[in-house]
Image: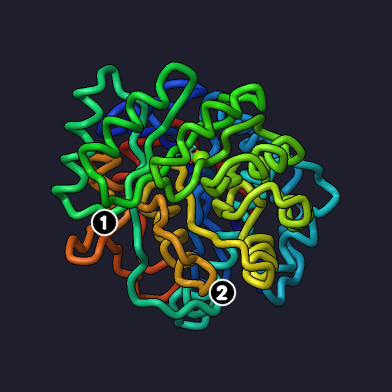
């Protein structure tokens, strides 16, 4: 195929609940929806960069710039035999994995739609449902946190991830663990601690956490290995893993026992598949992370999570947990009997973007042809 036209839609939607992490509070959430046109078919993907460089150095504006000025020109009007040809065209561009992933993933959706198969099948995945949990931000009060955990458990979620930061760690974790001795519980620090906090992490060992996610610096692997050697709780890396090499370094250094796979953070589905296969061969568990996606990015995550090494519940909650109205149909609904989402069976990502809703939330629109 040859890409004939690319459209970018910069949208912004209010979140149902503000989301507070150790790097900031998010009230509204932007996205760039990328649509790739060829032969009368459209492939969609979502760029998950934020307005601010908190989780990543990339922002909506850097992604807009890099997509328009470098990535899209590199793939327009060239022969693309398969999706991995896309990242190969802009391999020379350093960094910017979130922008890169959006363009590549739209081409994956296009190919799966062209073949009339669900993206999961096109990627080699098998499951009909994927296990999911919920990621709960830092709450203003302890009681507020307990109520929020209860409400998600009542809805049927069986895995709870709590965001932590210095001053909001042992006390909230103790409270949630005492109230729910048997739930799958984990904590995500988003890089808020240092090796000097090793004692604090040792004191989390009795909580029987599934894992502690990204406790140390956002581009560290070395210190995480030192930490993992001193605690029982499995360390999971999120922010630190951007490529197959990062995954290999982390595995060889024994810096983690678990990897949070975010397709945007590793630059697209080609790289995600490579890391998936490497981690599986090394016995490193994996699960699908989330970036508060709309239905477009959420659908891609659900399909990715059907691959065999996704052995732990993902941060892929029901659409209504994020937005009052999703921009794609149908929304994702939790199956409360087994804390899963059902994998769409239609071609590609299996959800359809609603043009009237995109127009309603759109701040900026660009057509490249
Ligand atoms: O660290 O996993 C993270 C959201 C934005 C940025 C970083 C993270 C998160 C989440 C939310 O934890 C997961 C979700 O989409 O529900
Ligand atoms: Mg994380």
Q: Which residue is mark 2?
A: 111
**Left or right, residue 255 beside residue 35:** right
What is the CA distance from the residue labelled 2 to the residue labelled 1? Answer: 23 Å
Residue at 64 percent of width and 40 percent of height: 230
Q: Within 10 Å of the Cα at label 1, are there few (<14), some (14-19), or many (20+) other Cα atoms?
A: some
**Left or right, residue 40 beside residue 248:** left
Q: Quadrant of residue 61?
A: top right
Q: Quadrant of residue 324?
A: top left
Is residue 126 visible to the viewer in this orientation of the structure? yes
Q: Which residue is situated farthest in the right direction here?
A: 92
Residue 301, percent across and down? 46, 59
The answer to whether 171 is drawn above or below residue 89 in the figure is above
Residue at 47 percent of width and 23 percent of height: 165
Residue at 44 percent of width and 50 percent of height: 210
The answer to whether mark 2 is within 8 Å of ligand 1 is no
Query: Which callout, 2 or 1, points at the residue further toward the start of the chain?
Result: 2
Q: Nearer the viewer, residue 243 or 210?
A: 210
Give SS at disc 2.
helix
**Left or right, residue 299 beside residue 142:** right
């Amino acid at each position: 195929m040859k890409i004939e036209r690319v459209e970018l839609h910069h949208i912004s939607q209010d979140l149902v609940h503000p989301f507070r992490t150790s790097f900031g509070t998010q009230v509204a959430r932007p996205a760039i929806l990328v649509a790739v046109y060829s032969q009368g078919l459209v492939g969609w993907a979502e760029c998950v960069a934020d307005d601010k460089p908190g989780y990543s150095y990339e922002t909506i504006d850097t992604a807009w710039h890099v997509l328009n000025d470098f990535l899209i020109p590199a793939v327009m009007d060239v022969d693309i035999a398969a999706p991995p040809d896309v990242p190969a065209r802009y391999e020379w561009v350093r960094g910017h994995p979130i922008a890169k992933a959006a363009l590549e993933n739209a081409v994956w959706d296009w190919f799966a739609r062209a073949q009339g198969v669900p993206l999961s099948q096109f990627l080699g995945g098998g499951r009909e449902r994927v296990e999911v949990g919920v990621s709960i931000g830092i709450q203003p009060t302890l009681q507020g946190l307990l109520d929020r955990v209860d409400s998600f458990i009542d809805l049927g979620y069986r895995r709870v991830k709590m965001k932590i930061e210095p001053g909001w760690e042992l006390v909230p974790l103790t409270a949630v663990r005492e109230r729910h001795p048997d739930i799958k519980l984990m904590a995500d620090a988003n890089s808020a601690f240092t090796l000097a906090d090793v004692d604090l992490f040792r004191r989390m060992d009795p909580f029987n956490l599934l894992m502690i996610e990204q406790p140390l610096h956002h581009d560290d692997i070395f210190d995480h290995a030192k930490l993992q050697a001193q605690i029982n709780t499995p360390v999971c890396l999120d922010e630190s893993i951007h490529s197959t090499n990062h995954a290999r370094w982390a595995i060889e250094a024994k810096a983690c026992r678990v990897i949070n796979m975010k397709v945007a953070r590793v630059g697209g589905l080609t790289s995600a598949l490579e890391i998936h296969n490497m981690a599986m061969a090394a016995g490193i568990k994996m699960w699908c992370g989330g970036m508060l996606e709309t239905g477009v990015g959420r659908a891609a995550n659900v399909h990715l999570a059907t691959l065999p090494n996704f052995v732990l519940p993902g941060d892929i909650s029901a659409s209504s947990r994020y937005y009052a109205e999703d921009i794609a149909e149908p929304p994702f609904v939790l199956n409360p009997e087994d804390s899963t989402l059902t994998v769409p069976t239609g071609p590609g990502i299996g959800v359809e973007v609603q043009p009237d809703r995109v127009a309603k939330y759109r701040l900026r629109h660009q057509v490249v042809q």
